Image (cartoon, rainbow, N blue to C red):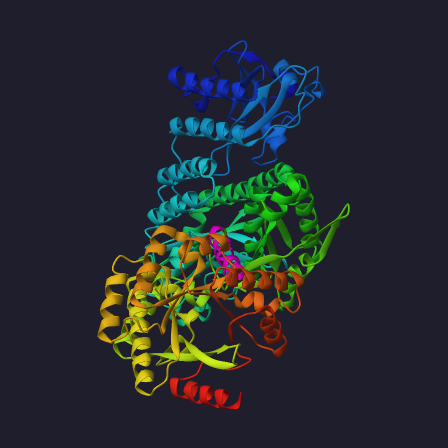
Amino acid sequence: MTKADCSVAGLPSPARLDLITGEIEARLERLARLAAGHYRVAGAGYSIIDGGIEWFRDPVHRAWVSLPVDDHQSILCAASGHLDVIWSCDPTSADSASPLPLLQSIVARIPLHAGNGEIVGSLFLMQPGGLHDETPDSEPLISYAALLAEEIMRHDCRPRSRGIGMIDPVKQQEAIQRAQAVFLTDSDGRAAFKAMLSDLLALTDSPLGLLGEVCLDPAGNRYLRVGAMTDISWSAETRAIFERVDTDEGVTFRDLDSLLCAPLRTGEVLVSDNLLADPRRKGLPAGHPPLGAYLGIPIYSGEVMTGLIGLANRAGGYSPALARELAPLGHTLGTLIERRRLYAERKEHARLLEQAANFDPLTGLPNRRMLNTLFETELREARLRGGTVSVCFIDLDNFKVINDSHGHHEGDRVLKAAAGRIRDVVRAHDVVTRLSGDEFVALLRDVDHPRAYQRLLDALFRPLNLDGQRFMLSGSMGVTVYPDDNSDPDKLLRHADQAMYAAKEDGKNRYNMFDLALHRSRKETTILLDQVREGLRENQFRLLYQPKIGLERNAVIGFEALIRWQHPRLGLLAPHAFLPRVEYTELDLSIGWWVIEQALDTLSRLRERGCDHGVSVNISPMHFLSDTFVDVLTGLMAQYGMIDDHRLTLEILESTALENLELASRVVDSCKALGVRVSLDDFGTGYSALTSFRHLAVDEIKIDRGFVSRMLKDGNDLTLVQLLVTLARKFGRMVVAEGVEENAALVQLEAMGCHAVQGFYFSPPLALEDALHWSEQHNAGR
């Protein structure tokens, strides 16, 4: 039949069209109307191919019109075997002399694909005058086409050849229809791969198998990313592999000489029924179940290899004939994988364009929402190149003071300047974002030296002049590094945030690395706590004593007792190696009471030797504010005969007092009634030193070592230390400066009127006998 022979008819006689009656016809027309409604066009229709003719259902006249499939307007000629939508925004370009006037208003057509290589018809949209907007999203139309094809084939029960009879063609057709449906509805492809693998295993009676997507690395080399595999959790190693399939990291195979991936290299079906003698058997993960037979089928979309079917251990083995019988399903899968990949690429491109507006309006940096996307991108690229990502959480020091003193307008200008300084000091491919307020996050690729972190802080720590106003900026930064810290973005950000607060506690204007050894997992914490319990039982803990020097007579007036852990495997551990994990557990109290009892025992022995030196110990917030603290302390003081002795000093953090000022004040008063002195440690780092002074009757304050170490270089810190000393003296408190490491600092403190000092300039913490010997020598030589 030629184009001139096309005719308008009633219902023609070919077998497939005989099925399109009654309820089936109503369902097909309903789907077409839904497609038209979705795209807001004048109408939609469908065609059926049978007997070498394409039959169009005219939705206006509700009649069938025919066209030979070799005509240039046939869907078979127009689609050229592809599955994509054919958009025609200018339908008037169609042949005006066409015997099918409805073709003149068609703006989109998509073939109805049965999944076995056969196109059974088309779905088309009609809009006189054409589309006025840009080309719409094709995916909804693809979904409607799949539903139409499924409806047609579900009722097309004409006999089909079963080939050699190894694969049930009806079940394979059902699998093809499921593949079309699930790939169109599954957002990430995992459910689709699992469903298709399940069908493949059932069709071939194979106990083991995998289904994967062929990907290209940056160098253009093929590798396989597993989309689904049978559960191989027979060992710890294989369980880890199986569980990784559903993660973003996924499971990949890159050795194309291995048994699993050889078809990616050759492009041909691989059949192996004697793996013990097959030299390609390498490449299986450790602990993988043994394989006796294997069938590897590369799957294609056109000329492009898109995936791999791997089946194993079928009773009776495999053959090329079995692979040929699976060709219809393989063809469907190959095309659907390629379509999903192309759609994912288009969707990603659209998402990036949409996020062009996700920038902080003040600083011009990406905002928190965009950080989530950039974070995922950086981690993914780091995995591909085998690199690292340093997550740097930066918080400006004392920015609230600037805002409160100079107003939000000036504060905003300072934030813009700080953002520019950070952006200017990193590399072009690094990411800098403003998280909120005065918080910034930088993602640095492949940092090879700590100087990169210090450069960020150095860039901030410069005077800033704005219209005659001079501001001193600094920042505290926490850093964690992926994949050493192999966490998701939210946890990486929290870890960097924790490290930033540690930097602030250490004195600000510095960075602190997140300590993976102490925070990696709950299991490690449990192990550590068990070791601490054993350490207490086995007397593995000890106290070292650092002398305190009274400046009035340049004489030793006492010692600070500092805990150390003589770990049987790791050696001598400082407090920061174990106390952070012990905090707020029952061991916090156990260690605290052990330290106090050891100090009381030391004081008792010093008294027997005629030595009146005092001993101070550090007490955690939880311990000092616990319900039974005063009662237990009273019992220990009485046991050692130390009530009203006034030589034991308890050092508490200023922040401890501010947690519950009323309770802390009561405990301080109870301690003083026992003859126990109380000292505020790290004074000046809290939010309100005046609050501590006014409400707590402490005996002394200790100026934080950070201020002392920086005061010779920073005039602000020097002024602050002078103010703290003056404040303490005004309130009648003894003032101790810790962290003295050079003579110039000592001279300054002495001139300020500081009562006592301690630090490595005089002596590091020592064993008791060594500390006493040092003390005797110092006092004798003064």
Q: Name the residue nearer the viewer: 568 or 163.
A: 568
The number of discs equals: 0
Q: Which residue lies at the image location 32% right of the left edge and 51% below the top edge?
A: 205
Left or right side of 742 for 588: left
Q: Which residue lies at the image location 50% right of the left edge and 38% below the top edge?
A: 117
Give how far across and how far down residue 337 sits, in percent: 51, 44
Give how far across and how far down residue 436 sits, in percent: 57, 44
Q: Is the residue 771 above or below the residue 219 in the image?
A: below
Give how far across and how far down residue 458 sits, in percent: 67, 61
Q: Is the residue 743 above or below the residue 273 in the image?
A: below
The single residue placed furthest to the right in the displayed view is 467
Q: Is the residue 747 above or below the residue 229 in the image?
A: below
**660 part of magenta stretch:** no
The quarter of the picture where the N terminus appears is top right
Q: Which residue lies at the image location 52% right of the left edge and 18% below the top edge?
A: 37
Q: Is residue 108 in sight in this rendering?
A: yes
**498 part of magenta stretch:** yes
Q: Is residue 366 in sight in this rendering?
A: no
Range of magenta residues? 490-505
Q: Name the residue nearer the viewer: 530 or 746.
A: 746
Q: Could you tell me what secondary structure mostly forms the magenta stretch?
A: helix
Left or right side of 780 for 565: left
Give how far across and how far down residue 599 sits, in percent: 33, 76
